[in-house]
Image (cartoon, rainbow, N blue to C red):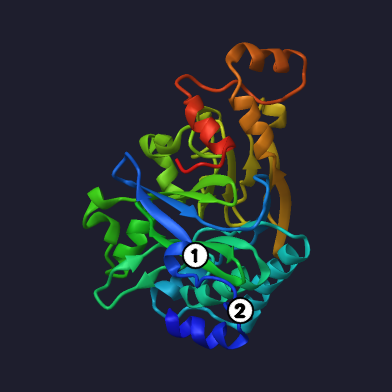
Amino acid sequence: FNQYKEFNYDWRFLYSNTDPIYPKDFFTLTQSENSNCKNINILEDNEVECNKKIGLANIEVSENDILSAIKMIPNISKERRKRIFEIMNYSHKKHVDLVVLPEVSVPFEWIDFFAEQSKNNNIAFIIGLEHVVSSYNFAYNFTATILPIKQKEFTTCLVRIRLKNYYSHSEKELLKGYRLINPSEIKPELKLYDLFHWRKSYFSVYNCFELANISDRALFKSKLDFIVATEYNKDINYFSGSWVRDLHCFFVQANSSQYGDSRIVQPAKSDFKNMISVKGGKHPVVLIDELQIDKLRDFQNKEYNLQKELIDKEKTHLKPTPPDFNKDNVLKRIKDEPI
């Protein structure tokens, strides 16, 4: 790291009047009270608001590309890269804070490219990486959370790669057909989820079939503003239900365009629940909406009588918070404190 700082910054005298910055100054990684959860707190000195502009990438995930990755001959063609460029350029033009792509939609070989774009254009990315096959025949299904960081004159990004905790039944059968091993089954007790605290917002990332575990969905109840889910899922009705209201947070779900159900959802009455919902289309597009996190927190901080008063006067479309919703965690999010 000292060599990196010297080659890229010291020669420009950027640190002449400031203290040097080291990796430990960018983020802290702490253990939650639940052994399966990590709390990642991003440390920055720039002024931002908690509301986040989300870009939902509506892009088709090709079954041929999935098979090519499993066979260790990933499709990294110029045409495919061009589609990714279109998503990035449009998101940058519209000043999007966070872009979400579906499960197994990006070759692992391009992760450095996404990190570079995140750092240079100040955009966060949550992407589903194609299967990475090791020399021991393990097939890794990763999600990557890439968050830009700015400290003084130094810009970088955090790249957090996490293994999928539960492979779907069809995914297991496909890997079995190519004599590949599901690594998450070797030590299932080592499953892991992350709670990110980034730029005054709190969120977690789930990878498709992980949402089917009701216990895992409830790990961060009252602790987050939104959930991001990367999916490659044909059965789009499988994850539909009341759990968005149960957790009382925004939900950002990116699925392959041919299956649809890519959407941004809020814990509101049925007519107003879907903020964005999209299916179909051959050409990649980015649909954008803003999560009004400050208004959600303000509503959550009220007791039921005040929430009901707002609902009855039609001043909000939000549903009341569920039982055992921890108001102390809401206050921590309002005050931008680590949870």
| Residue drawn at (53%, 67%) of the image | 157
| As drawn, 78 above or below 250 | below
Label 2 crowding class (10 Å Cα cut-off): few <14, some 14-19, many 20+? some
Q: Quadrant of residue 282?
A: bottom right
The residue singled out by tag 2 in the image is: 14
Three-letter amino acid code at the position of disc 2: Leu
Q: Specify whether residue 1 is in view.
A: yes
| Residue drawn at (64%, 43%) of the image | 264
| Residue drawn at (65%, 58%) of the image | 57
Q: Are marks 1 and 2 in contact (CB under 8 Å)?
A: no
In the visual, does 15 lie left or right of 86? left
In the visual, does 93 lie left or right of 209? right
In the rendered image, residue 226, in percent from the top left (x then y), is placed at 56, 42
In the rendered image, residue 47, in percent from the top left (x then y), is placed at 67, 53
Q: Which mark is residue 158?
A: 1
State which tag comes first along the sequence, 1 or 2.
Answer: 2
Q: Which mark is residue 16?
A: none
| Residue drawn at (21%, 54%) of the image | 187
Q: Specify whether residue 267 is in view.
A: no
How far apart are labels 1 and 2 at the CA level?
Answer: 22 Å
Q: Secondary structure at mark 1?
A: strand
Quadrant for the N terminus in the image: bottom left
Disc nearest the viewer among 1 and 2:
2
Three-letter amino acid code at the position of disc 1: Leu
| As drawn, 261 above or below 134 | above
In the rendered image, residue 24, in percent from the top left (x then y), is placed at 42, 64
Label 1 crowding class (10 Å Cα cut-off): few <14, some 14-19, many 20+? some
